[in-house]
Image: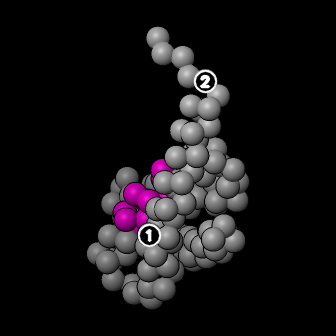
């Protein structure tokens, strides 16, 4: 069994944090695409929902672990909204879509604070 010292763990943590921050702008671009979409086309919305779920779900656990508590909290809310619809392959209801867009706007604002 390999034993890591604190420096190894710190280096690994910083590498994970760096990767997360590097990938954040691309995630926010996809989030922005959904926020800015005004389409009611079912197929297009379903594709966007699935794309969102693919980028938001991994953020749920990692963001808070890395010290980005607001991102973690908001991504969990968005994940909860998206999970059922993606599992069942159905488009969100209008009220769910409004809630999701509001949550994603807050998520984007939180990401902008990080830089």
The structure residue drawn at horizontal position 37% and vertical position 65%, both measured from the top left corner, is: 51
Task: State which tag comes first along the sequence, 1 or 2.
Answer: 2
The structure residue drawn at horizontal position 66% and vertical position 67%, both measured from the top left corner, is: 114
Residue 52 belongs to magenta span = yes
Furthest-front residue in view? Answer: 7
- Image quarter in which the C terminus is found: bottom right
Task: Give me the disc on residue 26.
Answer: 1
Vertical arrangement, residue 6 with respect to residue 87, above or below = above
Q: Main secondary structure of the magenta part?
A: helix
Task: Give me the disc on residue 5.
Answer: 2
Give how far across and how far down residue 19 sits, in percent.
Answer: 49, 54
| SS category of the residue bearing label 1 | helix
Give how far across and how far down residue 62 sits, in percent.
Answer: 56, 47
Vertical arrangement, residue 96 with respect to residue 70, above or below = below
| SS category of the residue bearing label 2 | loop
Q: Residues within 10 Å of mark 1 (few under 14, many from 20)?
A: few
Residue 28 seen in this snapshot: yes
Furthest-top residue in view? Answer: 1
Residue 82 seen in this snapshot: no
The structure residue drawn at horizontal position 57% and vertical position 50%, both measured from the top left corner, is: 17
Task: Give me the disc on residue 34.
Answer: none
Q: Residues within 10 Å of mark 2 (few under 14, many from 20)?
A: few
Q: Nearer the viewer, residue 77 or 4?
A: 4
Vertical arrangement, residue 97 with respect to residue 62, above or below = below
Q: Nearer the viewer, residue 7 or 19?
A: 7
24 left or right, relative to 113: left
The structure residue drawn at horizontal position 37% and vertical position 63%, both measured from the top left corner, is: 50
Q: Residue 105, located in which quarter of the rendered image?
A: bottom right
Segment colored magenta: 49-58
Give how far across and how far down residue 49 sits, in percent.
Answer: 40, 67
Vertical arrangement, residue 100 with respect to residue 3, above or below = below
Q: Which tag is nearer the camera, tag 1 or tag 2?
A: 2
């Amino acid at each position: 069994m390999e034993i890591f010292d604190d420096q190894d763990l710190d280096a690994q943590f910083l590498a994970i944090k760096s990767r997360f921050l590097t990938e954040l702008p691309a995630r926010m671009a996809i989030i922005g695409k959904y926020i800015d979409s005004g389409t009611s086309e079912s197929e297009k919305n379903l594709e966007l929902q699935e794309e969102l779920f693919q980028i938001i779900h991994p953020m749920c656990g990692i963001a808070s672990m890395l010290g980005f508590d607001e991102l973690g909290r908001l991504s969990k809310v968005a994940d909860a909204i998206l999970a059922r619809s993606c599992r069942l392959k159905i488009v969100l209801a209008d009220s769910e879509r409004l809630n999701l867009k509001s949550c994603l706007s807050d998520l984007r604002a939180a990401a902008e604070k990080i830089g």
